[in-house]
Every structure is written in structure tokens, then in C-alpha cells.
Amino acid sequence: MRRFESCRPSQFSPKLPQNLDFRMAPEPWWGICYKTLLQGWGFVRMGGIPNTIRRGGIYHFRRVVPQPLRERLARRELTCSLHTHQAGEARFLSRCLYLRSEELFLAVESASTLSDEDIAALVKDFYTTILARDDHYRLMADMPDQFREARAEHYRILASNAKRHLAENAYETVRQITSSMLARRYGLDAKFDKLSVRKTGQAMLRAGVEVAETLRARAEGDFSYEPTDKLLLQALREKPEPPAFPPSNEHDRSPPVVIGPIFSEAAETFREAQLRKAVWERQTYQQARATYSIFPIFSGDRPLNHYVRADAGRFKALLEDLPANYSKAAEFRGLTAEQIVEMTRSRDVPRLSPRTVQRHFAALSTLWDRAIEQGEATINIFNNWKFSAAKRARDQRQMWTSETLSELFRTPIWTGCQSEHRRSKPGKLVIRDEKFWLPLIAVFSGMRQEEICQLRLDDVRQVEGIWVFDLREGDGRQLKNSNAIRKVPIHDRLIDLGLLDYADRMRAASNKLLFPNLQPGGADDRLGHNYSKWFTRYRRDTGLYAEGLDFHSFRHSATTFMKRAGVADSTIDEVTGHATAGETARYNKGLTVANLKLAINSIELGIDLAYLTEK
């Protein structure tokens, strides 16, 4: 029984009954008129509705399978009940099913068939490649194999399992290696009919028995072992053929047999090490856990060197089809990523962004790099993938314009609120704390939120006679990268508004931080974590919330205002802590604090903030 739902047209997607099944039609009886046979069954041919017959008042779809496709489809005709007695509805459904059957026939015609010679070549490639890699690792090993007996027993078990799977027709057990070998030889986009795939799987199981037996014999010191499988023997005796791809292509080589931890063990050990050595922040550590959980469920939990580039390609396709809320929505709880994709395939829902998919791949690529260093992998299958950019970087967030900044700085935080705990309600109290200063510093400096939140009082100092924010490492500071270490001159407008006087008051109160009220929170204990949530609530309460317009948008505004004032890109990059691309990066090291001060002071919001001056 074949579900007709599986044959979906690409340009025509009507609503069809969910229980339409194609059924195998019985063979016609020789010597009996076909019309008489249909009448004997109670069918009446409906000449006005193509590809339909009626039985007991119910319409049925019927279409003969073209002769060349009958063997591959294992049926002579496609039939299913339309579950209706209405002629108009039957005509509509019949047309839908006709289009779907056209797609089915086209798909079957385009699926390649593998000859016995093709399969033999795949088997030979599989067998000889693994043995060649085993030779290489044996010859290059610097120490005796202390696990020889364990390896021999391991290969004996593998051979036994492969024989059992052969007996049970369990071709699914070698689905991964079968797909990898086909992709390696014919490319990722190649499609093959079901019979060819199963024949290849059976051949891989037979070759797997011989591979395991040969490696077991080698582990016991017997290098004269000869395979006994006739298919493999015949393939090995044939004249070697030119490779179907350049052997130097590192991305398409089949995996060597090596001893190493399985993915889940290697990934968890690596993740803990990255956190322990402070290479990763806790947020990155937690994000990697999600990546490392999805991958082995989808691709199988194997040693890292047993994955091939085709596995990475399939995983990329899976991620690109995942809904953006797959980890949060209650309806997806308990389902695998593959099940979620299948459930939402026909829905119009937001999917993971290219940037998120790229982040998953970065976590896997870093793991593979470490495995290569430790000899547990030979190539990084997650390198050199392309990810489309859904938006240009400058379009990913909005900027605070002069108009929106004027609206923001006319809300109760800056004009007067009711109390410390009712900041969004208009009143007469202006509290000049972190909630007052953070947006002002951000828009007049281009600094990141956490860079501002973690400022120490000794970071506010004079350099060459100019007041600066001295962004540096140490004392628990968290900077994004080495470019974030810099000196950002303090804008004259901030000084006029009383920022230095505020800093003096904090020093007099024996505080260490410029904004001592901020408390660490989130996965990485960031001082800006709770403030970020509060600022979102405040914008909602004051009617200023807009998608893509957030605290980070102040940084976009500062950059844009400097750009409009004619400041060079390299100078803007040094002020904001960005890496300058190209040759320009070599010539911006001579900028003085005075140069940077000119760039900072070029930021003009185009609004009057005189009312914020401390009286």
C-alpha cells in the first residue's frame, strides 16, 4: 500500500482527502474483455471525467503505469478511492492526482539505476580504501598497539553483526555508509532507485564482513588473509579503473577506521575543556550543548573520523529546515529535529536564520579542529561551507534616528518619573543612575552594552589630557575580542551633562564600579543581563518598542553619525572596536587620542538635550 500523499506536486497543492491510497490493480484475465471485467466488478466508466471509474456510486481514480516503469514501481496501474459521489469534486481530485502521478513518473524516470559493475566498483573502493588507511596508521604509529587483542575482538563482533544483518535484510544499518559511498562517487545530488540503493546496501554489508575479518586477522598478525565473498573477489581481480574524483580532494574521502571516542563523549569532553580553560564563555558553552545534542541523533553517534562531508551536508539541510522556535514551542517537546522538520514541512513558519546555522557549524568545526590536532580525525568536514545572508549586516538592526532619540529622551527616565520603582510613570523625580546614563553613553560613544556596564571608576581617566573610557582586560572584565581593547574618548556632551561629576560621587561613596547597582546575571554573569531585560520592558511601557530597535541600535547610530560627519572607516573601527578589513588596517595604528576625540565629538544627534544638564 503506498500513500498517495507522498507524491506532492511542486506547483499545485490542493486539499486532498488524507486517506487516498494507490492500490495494486489485479492482473487482467486472459481472453476476457476488459470492459466486461469492469462491469462484472460493478464499475461504470465515466467518459466525461478522465482517469476515473465509479463503483457503488463512489468515484475512483485509475491510471495505467507506463510500461517502462512497471518493473521499477512493481505495479501495473495506480488506483485509489476519491471518497466522493459528486462529479464536480471527482473531476477536481482526479486532476490533482493526475498531476501527482506525473511527478511520480518523472521522479522514477530521473532516478538512476546502478549496474552490477557500478556496485562492484563501490565495494572495491570501500574495501581497498579502509585497508589502505589501516596500513597507513600502522606504519605511522610511534608506539606498539597495546590494544591489539581488544581490537581483534572488536572486529570479530563487527563481522558477526554484519552477517546477522545480512541474514535479516537489515540494510538500514549501513544506510550512512551506503549514502556516503554513493555521494562520494556520484555527488551529493545524485538520486538512485530503491532497488539500486538496496543492492548497494547488501553489497556493503557483504564487504563489511570481509573488512572486519581482514582487520581482525591483521590484529592477530595474519596479513595473508584473503576475502572469500565472491562479489568482492571478482571486484578485486578486475583491472583498476581511474578514480571517479580527484584523490586529493580532502572533503570527499571515505572515513578511515580509527579507534577513538564516539561523538557524544568527544563533544562533551571538549565542551567542558573549552569552559574550564576560559576559551568559551558560558553562553557559548550552552549553545554548543544544543548543537552537540542534535547532531548525533540525526547522523548517528560514531567516532569523529567515521563521519564524511556528506553527513555535514545533510545536517546543514536539516538545520535550514528547522523552525526558529523549535527548542521553545511546547508542541515540539520530546520530538527529534528530524520529526519537527517533517511536522512543519508544509507550514509557513520562520526557519533558523543563516547566522544561527553558521553558529552551529562553527561549534562543530572547532570540535573537529581539536580532533585533528589529537589524531582522532584527518579532515574537517565542517569547513568551507557557504551560508546565505538573509540581510545585509547594516540592515539587521534599525538605528535610533534623531526623531526616535528625541522621543526616547523625552520619556520619564530623563524628564521625571514617579519613583525609583515606577520609572515609566511621569513624575518629578530624575534619578541619574545607570538607567539614565547607559543609553546616553552608548549613543555618544558607540560602545557595546557590556563594555559600558562593566566600567570601573579607574577606567574613567585622562590620557594625554583627554578624558577617556579605558577599555582593558583584567579584574573580571569581559571583552568580545582583542579589538575591543581600546581607549574611547568621552564626548563633550556627556561631560556637559555631568558624567564626570557622577563618577566623582561614586568614588566618594567608595564604589569600585561606575554603575554599582548593576547585578550579574545570565549564563555568563554579565552585568548588562538584567538591564537589557528592563530596557525592553521600559520601551514597551512607554510605547517605543519596535522590532530590531534595541540597545545595540545605539551603536549603529553612533557609527552612522560619525560616517555622516566624514570620519574615515578605519577611525570609526578603532573607536568602536571593530577589525578593519584590507590594507587600511596597516595604517591606522598612528591615531592619537586627540584624533579619536575629534571622531567622537563629530557625533551630533540633531536634538536639544540642554534640559538634561544637571542644575
Image (cartoon, helix red, strand yellow):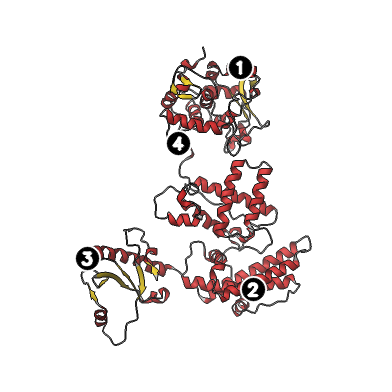
Give coordinates of residue 586: x percent, y percent. 62, 35
Q: Please name whichever residue, 237 or 426, is drawn nearer the observer in this view of the structure.
A: 426
Q: Could you say whether the residue bearing mark 4 is in a helix, strand or loop?
A: loop
**How far is disc 4 from disc 2 in space, using C-alphas?**
59 Å
Res. 448 visible in picture: no
- Amino acid carrying label 1: it is Arg
Earlier in the chain: of badge 4 and badge 1, it is 1
**How far is disc 2 from disc 1 in space, using C-alphas?**
78 Å
Mark 1 neighbour density, 10 Å: few (under 14) some (14–19) many (20 or more): few
Q: Residue beneath label 3, please? A: 87
Give coordinates of residue 60: x percent, y percent. 28, 70
Q: Could you say whether the residue bearing mark 3 is in a helix, strand or loop?
A: helix
Q: Residue beneath label 2, please? A: 160
Q: Could you say whether the residue bearing mark 2 is in a helix, strand or loop?
A: helix
Instruction: Name the residue located 59 percent from the left edge and 63 percent from the top edge.
Output: 246
- Amino acid carrying label 2: it is Ser
Earlier in the chain: of badge 3 and badge 2, it is 3
